[in-house]
Image (tube, rainbow, N blue to C red):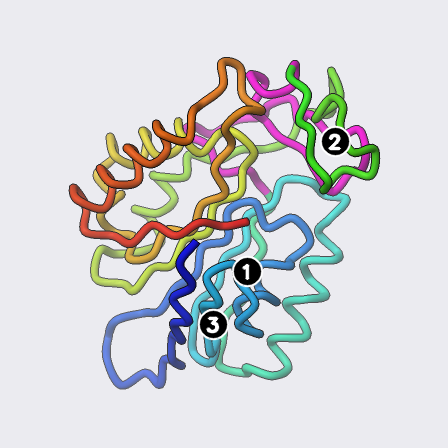
Amino acid sequence: MKCTNQTFPANAGLTERRSVLLDCGANVGQSLTAFAQGTTPSLDRIIFDGWDVFSFEPNPKLHHRIEKVMDGLAAEYERTSFELVPAGCWWEDGELTFFEGIATHQAGTFASWRRKRAEPCNRWPTGSGPVVKSDGPSLPVIDFPAWVKAHLTKDDLILMKVDIEGAEYKLIEAMEAAGVMDWIDIFYVEWSTQSLTPPVSRRDVNILIRRLEATYGLQVRKWL
């Protein structure tokens, strides 16, 4: 994977263009820390001063950890707005069953088409096994493309990180249908492939990446 080592500067308020980070699938806030420290997979870094940061995470068990990260960054960057949106990024408003990870409650997904497959992966303490439990609580999801239209503009500088465990493909379709895909400048994605039912090939992912970049002029970068 190419490391771009790009640093996104502070927004000093000298222009009307906002600088925005959308963290879809915030988990415990580790993405914010990685961007602040320049330890993202692409080694990109954000100097958060003056930015607007929105972290989307439906799992209430993780909210206190995200807020702790936000509080630490807010103490360093006083002009930055940090907001936790307690919902999953979806293509309609409502509530869905949240399939929690078997090995740890830090992992989970609304993507029911993922839960029946096993994913050999050293991120799980057991090394392999079912990705998620067969049932779980109902948690909120939002119509993410509609949220983007309501809160942002096409003129904003928008970095978007997506780690939503298999729902990224349908979310991209919904953003394209809503006409907001070209609002995104840098698109960081953790692509689910063999853990899906049916699985998605790496070739299909690469074709999708090339199409997104060619059609919308955005940059797609791998997340994890």
Q: Badge 1, how many Cα within 10 Å: few under 14, some, many 20+?
A: some
Q: Which residue is mark 3?
A: 45
Q: Which one is earlier in the sequence, the residue at label 2 or at label 3?
A: 3
Residue 112, magenta (yes or no): yes
| Residue 101 numbered mark, or none | 2
* Three-letter code for the amino acid on which mark 3 is drawn: Arg
* Three-letter code for the amino acid on which mark 1 is drawn: Glu
Q: Which residue is mark 1?
A: 83
- The residue at the point 71 percent across, 51 percent down is 63
Q: Which one is earlier in the sequence, the residue at label 1 or at label 2?
A: 1
- The residue at the point 34 percent across, 50 percent down is 220
Q: What stretch of residues is rendered in magenta?
A: 87-116
Name the image quarter holding residue 152. Answer: bottom left
Along the line of sight, the residue nearer the viewer: 5 or 8 = 5
- The Cα atoms of the two marked residues, 2 and 3, are separated by 29 Å
Q: Badge 2, how many Cα within 10 Å: few under 14, some, many 20+?
A: some
